[in-house]
């Protein structure tokens, strides 16, 4: 590593305006920057270029079934919780053309997707989302059958992580051991302090992106402030989920009457699976033109809450909301562990915030535990 760059595992102090130079370095290296920005009354993930694109001075208020943006007087860049977008939309897009086919001179010519995926730099990734990407890696890359489309997008990602400055009432990352501070899976990790970012360097690529910035070695005072800030954030997490008995609890209560209770509230709208950072189910649609000379195959995001998702030859194996909600919850927290060796939940709380009727995943588990079938 050149002497003017920090070593991997170092912690450095970076003036906040200097983050723009990091952005410029990333763009010069060929990365497309994606990060948080304010749009449509929420903080979404979209292409960005400058610090002004970030939601500086904005925070959010989240409750079950409720989300509101709020302007603050504090000039903080990352003072908000996770929004409706998850990073999987860039790694595992909801609409992907797999190939096209065209009849030419009596023969069929197959063409793969034309454009290579961008090299993404993810800006503002939270610890729970780092864990979610790790879960997707295991699901889509770790088995016998690898998803080549995910692999192409994943191999070039630069992760600029931001440790949480606050939590929302819907968060329960401490129960899932996924936050609020990231310890692995990043190239650079920022902790926002009043006048600086404390930056942890996680890779050679991360160190390189600090080139030409006025970074300085972090002092004991800086490290202490950051540590206290993270302790304060961790103490803010009030929602809890007991996890040590989850698979057995769910397997032993598949016929519990509480599934009928939640089914009376659930709309089967699939919002929870759309915002979930780890849900990965898809379907495939084939289309053709009216002359039958052109066609394409498209992969679309799907959900176990959709009625047609569970339709097989001979009928539907999950014909009602009760069975579909039970499938989602028991797969996410139990059989996912059997399949992939990890829970499918990272405690981000998105499914609670964005459920139109405010169904709370932690409360549903507690209801089964408190009223366990005899």
Image (cartoon, rainbow, N blue to C red):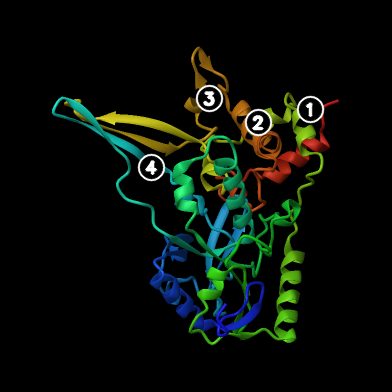
Quadrant in which the N terminus is drawn: bottom right
Residue placed furthest toward the left: 105
Residue placed furthest toward the top: 314
- Label 4 near label 2: C-beta < 8 Å? no
> Residue at point 54% right, 80% down?
75
Give percent across and percent down for residue 184: 66, 61
Determine which of the numbered discs, if any, sits on residue 326 in the image. 2
User: Of label 3 and label 2, which has the lower sequence position?
Assistant: 3
Which residue is denoted by mark 4 in the rendering?
Answer: 96
Q: CA distance from mark 3 to mark 4?
A: 22 Å
Look at the image and tell me whether residue 41 can be seen.
no
Give percent across and percent down for residue 67: 55, 57
> Residue at point 73% right, 23% down?
255
Q: Considering depth in this image, is 265 or 328 the residue closer to the camera?
A: 328
Q: CA distance from mark 1 to mark 3?
A: 23 Å
User: Of label 3 and label 4, which has the lower sequence position?
Assistant: 4
Quadrant in which the C terminus is drawn: top right
User: Of label 2 and label 4, which has the lower sequence position?
Assistant: 4
Which residue is denoted by mark 3 in the rendering?
Answer: 310
User: Of label 1 and label 3, which has the lower sequence position?
Assistant: 1
Which residue is denoted by mark 1 in the rendering?
Answer: 252
Q: Of tags 4 and 1, which is closer to the observer? A: 4
> Residue at point 44% right, 75% down?
25
Determine which of the numbered discs, if any, sits on residue 296 in the image. none
Q: Considering depth in this image, is 53 or 74 the residue closer to the camera?
A: 53
Mark 3 nearby-residue class (10 Å; few <14, some 14–19, many ≥20): some
**Secondary structure category for the residue under label 3:** helix
Q: Of tags 3 and 4, which is closer to the observer? A: 4
**Secondary structure category for the residue under label 4:** strand
- Label 3 near label 1: C-beta < 8 Å? no
């Amino acid at each position: 590593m050149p002497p003017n760059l920090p070593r991997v595992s170092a912690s450095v102090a970076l003036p906040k305006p200097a983050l723009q130079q990091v952005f410029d370095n990333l763009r010069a290296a060929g990365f497309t920057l994606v990060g948080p920005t304010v749009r449509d009354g929420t903080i979404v993930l979209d292409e960005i270029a400058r610090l002004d694109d970030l939601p500086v001075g904005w925070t959010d208020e989240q409750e079950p079934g409720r989300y509101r943006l709020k302007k603050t007087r504090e000039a903080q860049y990352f003072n908000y919780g996770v929004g409706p977008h998850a990073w999987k939309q860039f790694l595992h897009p909801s609409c992907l053309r797999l190939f096209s086919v065209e009849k030419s001179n009596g023969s069929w010519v197959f063409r793969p997707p034309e454009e290579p995926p961008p090299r993404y730099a993810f800006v503002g990734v939270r610890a729970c989302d780092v864990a979610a990407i790790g879960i997707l890696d295991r699901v889509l890359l770790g088995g016998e059958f690898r998803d080549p489309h995910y692999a192409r997008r994943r191999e070039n990602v630069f992760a600029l992580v931001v440790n949480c400055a606050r939590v929302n009432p819907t968060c329960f990352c401490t129960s899932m051991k996924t936050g609020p501070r990231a310890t692995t899976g990043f190239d650079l990790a920022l902790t926002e302090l009043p006048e600086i970012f404390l930056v942890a360097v996680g890779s050679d690529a991360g160190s390189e992106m600090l080139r030409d910035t006025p970074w300085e070695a972090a002092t004991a005072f800086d490290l202490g402030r950051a540590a206290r800030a993270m302790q304060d954030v961790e103490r803010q997490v009030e929602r809890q989920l007991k996890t040590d008995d989850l698979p057995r609890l769910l397997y032993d209560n598949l016929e519990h009457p509480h599934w009928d209770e939640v089914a009376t509230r659930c709309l089967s709208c699939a919002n929870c699976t759309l915002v979930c950072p780890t849900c990965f189910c898809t379907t495939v649609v084939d289309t053709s033109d009216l002359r039958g000379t052109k066609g394409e195959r498209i992969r679309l995001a799907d959900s176990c809450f959709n009625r047609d998702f569970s339709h097989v030859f001979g009928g539907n194996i999950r014909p009602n909301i009760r069975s579909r909600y039970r499938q989602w919850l028991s797969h996410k927290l139990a059989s996912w562990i059997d399949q992939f060796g990890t829970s499918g939940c990272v405690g981000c709380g998105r499914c609670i915030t964005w459920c139109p009727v405010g169904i709370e995943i932690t409360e549903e588990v507690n209801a089964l535990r408190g009223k366990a079938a005899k």
